[in-house]
C-alpha cells in the first residue's frame, strides 16, 4: 500500500516526509476558518469552512482518485473532539434540554470516594477539577452537550467515507480502524480532562471492520493498545513489521489464531509544568482492576472495574478484556466510559440519548450502521 494520506496534528511548514500526499494544520487547528489555514504538501491553502467537513472532503476526494487495483493507506485524523468544543452549525443545540447524568464517582464523600488519594481530592478545586474547572464557572453538563454535538460531525464523516468505499466496491476489503487519542473525564472522580490512570482517561475507543480478514459476533479477552496499530496495519498490507516496536499485530487475536498475548498494560504519565495538579504516575491495567502508583510519595490505589470502588495500599492485578459483535466486527471494552456505563456509574445523557450518542468513548453511529467493530481500548 504505497499511497497514503495523513491528516495529523503537527506544526509544519513543509510536507511531511514519507507520505505521498499530506494535509495538515498548525497546532490543533481551528474548528472555523482562521488565518493559518491548511498545509497541503507544503503549500498554504485557506480553510473555507468547518474543519471536520473539510477534512472529510479531502479524504473522500483522495480515495476517489485511487485506481481500483491500487492498494492504499489513509490516516484521517480529526481535530474533533478537541476542546474548546464547537459543533457544526447543523448540530448546534441538538441535545439541548437533554438531562445530563452526573457520574456517581463525582461524589466528594461517601462510598465512591473511599480510598481516594489526597491529590485527587485536592484536585477537585483546581484547573482540572469539578469545583473550579479551567478556573471558571464552566457548567459540566453544558460542556458535555457541546462535546456530544461536536462529535456528530465525526459521525457524519465516517458515514461519508464508508459510503465512498461502498460505492467503489471496497468496503469489505478495507481494514477500517477507528480510535481516539485518549479518554476524557466529565466529572468522574471529581475530575475533568485526561492524563490520569483512571478508566475514563487512560482507555480509548478502538473499532475495526474488515469482513475479509475476520468475522464478528465474538468475545475476545485480550488487552490491545495504540502501540499495536502499526504492526497490525503492516500485517494487513503483507509487510513484515520491524522487531523494534513494543506493539504486536492483533489480527491473529481477532481472527481466532490467538496465541500468547499480554495480560496487562503499563500506563505512564510524567508531571507537566503546564498542568502541575496531576502528578507523575505509573499504573498497571488489567481486566478486572488497575493498580496505580502516583506522586512523589508513591501513593497506591486499586480500582476494581466492576464496582468502580477505590482501594488504597499495595496491590498486584492481572488480565484484560475485549468484546465483539456484529458481522466482520470486533468490539472491545474501549474507553473507560463504556466500562462505567455497564455498571451504571458513568455520567452523560440519560435514557434514549445514551443509545443515540456515541458515548464519551466516541463510538460513532454511522460506523455502527455499516458494521462497526469495537476493539479493546488500550492507553
Image (cartoon, grey):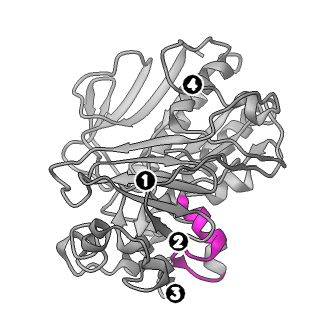
Residue 64 sits in which quadrant? top right
The residue under the point 60% across, 71% down is 307
Q: Nearer the viewer, residue 24 or 314?
A: 314
Which label number is shown at residue 309?
Answer: 2
Q: Is residue 178 left or right of residue 280?
A: right
Q: Residues within 10 Å of mark 2 (few under 14, many from 20)?
A: some
- Of labels 2 and 1, earlier in sequence is 1
- To which residue does mark 4 refer? 73
The residue under the point 32% across, 81% down is 139
> In what element is the residue under mark 1?
strand
Decide: is 106 above or below 148.
Answer: below
Q: Which residues are magenta?
A: 336-351
- To which residue does mark 3 refer? 99
Q: Is residue 155 left or right of residue 54?
A: right
Q: Residues within 10 Å of mark 3 (few under 14, many from 20)?
A: some
Q: Position of residue 218 (x, y in %)?
A: 83, 47
Distance, label 3 to label 2, CA atoms, is 25 Å
Q: Residues within 10 Å of mark 1 (few under 14, many from 20)?
A: many
Q: Is residue 175 magenta?
A: no
The residue under the point 34% across, 67% down is 117
Q: Position of residue 269 (x, y in %)?
A: 33, 45
Amino acid at each position: 500500500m504505497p499511497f497514503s494520506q495523513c491528516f495529523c496534528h503537527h506544526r509544519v511548514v513543509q510536507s511531511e516526509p514519507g507520505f505521498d500526499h499530506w494535509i495538515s494544520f498548525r497546532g490543533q487547528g481551528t474548528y472555523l476558518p482562521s488565518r493559518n489555514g491548511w498545509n497541503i504538501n507544503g503549500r498554504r491553502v485557506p480553510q473555507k469552512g468547518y474543519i471536520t467537513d473539510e477534512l472529510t472532503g479531502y479524504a473522500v476526494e483522495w480515495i476517489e482518485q485511487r485506481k481500483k487495483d491500487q492498494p492504499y493507506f489513509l490516516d484521517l485524523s480529526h481535530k474533533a473532539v478537541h476542546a474548546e468544543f464547537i459543533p457544526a452549525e447543523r448540530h448546534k443545540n441538538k441535545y439541548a434540554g437533554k438531562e445530563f447524568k452526573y457520574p456517581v464517582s463525582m461524589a466528594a464523600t461517601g462510598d465512591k470516594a473511599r480510598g481516594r488519594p489526597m491529590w485527587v481530592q485536592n484536585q477537585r478545586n483546581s484547573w482540572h477539577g469539578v469545583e473550579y474547572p479551567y478556573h471558571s464557572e464552566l457548567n459540566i453538563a453544558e460542556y458535555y452537550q457541546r462535546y456530544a454535538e461536536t462529535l456528530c460531525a465525526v459521525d457524519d464523516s465516517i458515514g461519508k467515507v464508508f459510503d465512498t468505499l461502498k460505492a467503489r466496491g471496497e468496503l469489505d476489503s478495507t481494514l477500517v480502524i477507528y480510535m481516539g487519542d485518549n479518554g476524557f473525564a466529565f466529572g468522574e472522580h471529581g475530575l475533568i480532562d485526561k492524563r490520569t490512570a483512571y478508566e475514563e482517561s487512560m482507555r480509548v475507543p478502538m473499532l475495526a471492520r474488515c469482513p475479509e480478514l475476520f468475522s464478528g459476533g465474538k468475545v475476545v479477552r485480550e488487552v490491545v493498545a495504540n502501540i499495536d496499530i502499526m504492526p497490525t496495519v503492516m500485517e494487513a498490507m503483507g509487510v513484515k513489521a520491524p522487531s523494534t516496536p513494543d506493539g504486536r499485530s492483533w489480527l491473529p487475536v481477532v481472527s481466532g489464531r490467538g496465541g500468547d498475548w499480554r495480560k496487562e498494560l503499563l500506563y505512564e504519565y510524567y508531571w507537566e509544568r503546564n498542568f502541575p495538579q496531576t502528578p507523575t504516575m505509573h499504573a498497571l491495567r488489567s481486566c478486572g482492576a488497575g493498580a496505580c502508583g502516583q506522586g512523589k510519595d508513591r501513593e497506591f490505589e486499586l480500582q476494581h472495574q466492576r464496582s468502580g470502588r477505590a482501594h488504597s495500599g499495595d496491590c498486584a492485578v492481572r488480565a484484560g478484556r475485549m468484546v465483539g459483535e456484529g458481522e466482520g466486527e470486533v468490539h472491545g471494552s474501549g474507553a473507560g466510559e463504556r466500562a462505567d456505563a455497564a455498571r451504571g456509574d458513568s455520567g452523560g445523557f440519560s435514557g434514549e440519548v445514551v443509545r443515540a450518542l456515541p458515548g464519551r468513548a466516541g463510538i460513532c453511529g454511522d460506523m455502527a450502521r455499516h458494521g462497526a467493530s469495537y476493539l479493546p481500548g488500550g492507553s
